[in-house]
Amino acid sequence: MQAGHPEGSPEALKAGMKKHGIGPTLMSQILRLSEFHTYPAPGVLIGAFMVDWAQELLGVSPDRKLYAVCETPKCLPDALQVMARCTTGNNRLRVVPIGKFAITLNAPTDNDTADAVRVFVDLEKLKKFPTIDIWYANSPAYDKHAMKMRLQDEIFRAGRDILSYEKVRVLVTKKKKWKSVTCPCCGETVPDYLLEGNRCGACGSMRYYERI
Amino acid sequence: MQAGHPEGSPEALKAGMKKHGIGPTLMSQILRLSEFHTYPAPGVLIGAFMVDWAQELLGVSPDRKLYAVCETPKCLPDALQVMARCTTGNNRLRVVPIGKFAITLNAPTDNDTADAVRVFVDLEKLKKFPTIDIWYANSPAYDKHAMKMRLQDEIFRAGRDILSYEKVRVLVTKKKKWKSVTCPCCGETVPDYLLEGNRCGACGSMRYYERI
């Protein structure tokens, strides 16, 4: 935290980024991202460097339509949503709950597979950044309250230095054609491909609420 | 589309909302939401009215921390992300792929269950809005190119008039405690609860890419 800025404020975040020479474009993206996520979580800050690098590696303009896979549901998807405009609702983001801090990004193609770039947190490289290392490992040595700002400072100092990338190929998923069908249990309509047997998920395994 | 504004532009969207007397707060939310989603899809526009009403029904201030369930992965999650600040990455949004245009919203609680409000597109009420009705049913009678602006106009005219709500109770999911474990196949670490047998998902059923 910089003197004069309350911890966690946008001003403190900005000062922390300036200290490590983060450029104005990435800085403004990180501010937007933190607001979207509701706070500057370590995972979204690392995610910002990941998405920024992946976009650069792909060599596409920032407004280009992209498709993303995120290998963890924690924090990281929000960096892809805000910076690469691959959102949960626009169908360009797929979360695969493997549990690794890794993303894959590719441009649209008419082929069945796409060449993509995979950027990931490199466990070897983490060894030079002890606070990020114990935070990432969920070690009891990481004290959230005492070390939060040290962690943030280390993330900004590290930037891309904790990341590696590889070129990969991913399957392209095509839009499903669908018909609206009426569930015989609840009388409501759902897309046919989401039926469980002959009834909808809410009348089957996916019911998650009871009426009160 | 209003004369003088290119179809799909923020100005055309604004003019369309003004025509139907949509208030300035909701209007600015819809503009932000359309930008996030990358375009004003019918599903996010309907979603904006759903989230707005659900928040009002809960009687909470707009900055209150909330938890959401979305019953479709299409468009609607983005309205919850931008307006209710329940995002994929901050763990306050759960998408349950039932295939209904419905959301559930609740405030935090220490109990095992939470009282929530469920807002949904009411098929009976859709009958008064023929363009939304055929769009929602994915009917061949809906012509995307010719009817897009008519659909948008009908959505703004309808507002909450195509929606209903019910009070429900949902299970509260607690944060999982986890340890970092090393996958014997790839040598990388993942949270223990995401292992498939003794190996990580990427070495198991979730591998989604090949190196090139």
Image (cartoon, coloured by chain):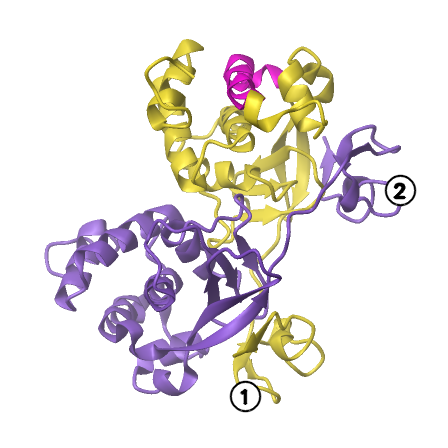
Chain colours: A purple, B yellow
Please say whether residue B195 is visible from this viewpoint: yes
Residue at the (54%, 43%) spot, across then down: A89
Which segment did they paint magenta?
A: B147-163
Percent across and percent down for residue B133 are 68, 20
Percent across and percent down for residue A205 are 80, 49
Which of B67/A58 is in front? A58
Q: Amino acid at mark 1?
A: Gly
Residue at the (55%, 44%) spot, across then down: B109
Residue A179: which numbered mark, if any?
none
Quadrant (top left, top right, bottom left, bottom right) of the C terminus of chain A? top right
Is-magenta flag for residue A205? no
Q: Amino acid at mark 2?
A: Asn
> Height in image: A114 above or below A160?
above
Label 2 crowding class (10 Å Cα cut-off): few <14, some 14-19, many 20+? Answer: some
Percent across and percent down for residue B7 are 41, 24
* Chain letter of the residue beneath label 1 in the structure image: B
Which of B35/A141 is in front? B35
What secondary structure predominates along the stretch shown in magenta? helix
* Chain letter of the residue beneath label 2 in the structure image: A
Q: Which residue is mark 2?
A: A198
> Height in image: B19 above or below A143?
above
Q: Which residue is mark 1?
A: B187
Percent across and percent down for residue B154 are 55, 15
Which of A176/B34 is in front? A176
Decide if residue B160 is on the left or right side of residue A177. Answer: left
